Amino acid sequence: VDYGDLPASGAEPRVAALVGEWYYREHGSLSMKYMLDRDDAENLYFVEQHSTAREVCGLLVPHGEWYIASLVFSDTGEHHGTIRLQLQSAMDIVVSNFRALGTTDWGHDVAALRGCHDPETTIMSRMSSPVSSLRVPMTPMSASLKAC
């Protein structure tokens, strides 16, 4: 995997702060989520339901200020592209960029907000979008990690 222009780093970023469900807007409405979770060996994984209804996942590794993963489709192992994530802890958001297969440039910045169970502070209330607009079916995290 070619990580491009990202500087290497020996410092381990805070994994615990990244674990959870992260929601982002697509075409102006809250419509997508991804999950970041650890397995029993403390490896950090990215899992998301792709727009084709297939799941993509990848092992995230620290690289400078970023975590980066080569994404594969869980059902076939077919490569999908690369994602990089950076926690903006002061705002509790994750900024991500996607790079499609065969390209060298990262896509635009996508900001994601952490989901939570308190209705007063959920992502839906923070982004003023009704729960009914979510289209985020996902398999349980444990099954997803086994596929990666």
Image: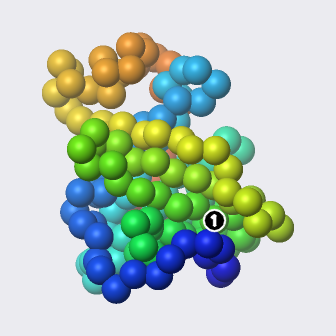
Report the side of 70 relative to 17 (left or right).
right
**In which quadrant will I find the N terminus?**
bottom right
Residue linked to disc 1: 82
Tell me if 110 is positioned left or right of 142 in this view: right
Colouring used for the render: rainbow
Q: Quadrant of residue 108?
A: top right
- Residue at (56%, 44%) from the top-left corner? 109
**Percent x, y of residue 52:** 71, 44
User: How many other residues sit within 10 Å of disc 1, few (<14), some (14-19) or many (≥20)?
Assistant: many
Q: Residue 29 at what x, y percent from top left?
A: 54, 20
User: Height in image: 79 above or below 49?
Assistant: below
Residue at 76 percent of width and 66 percent of height:
104
Measured from the top left, where is residue 33 in percent x and y?
47, 41
**How many badges with numbers are in the image?**
1
- The extreme right residue here reads 102
Against 54, residue 135 (above or below) is above
Amino acid marked by disc 1: Thr
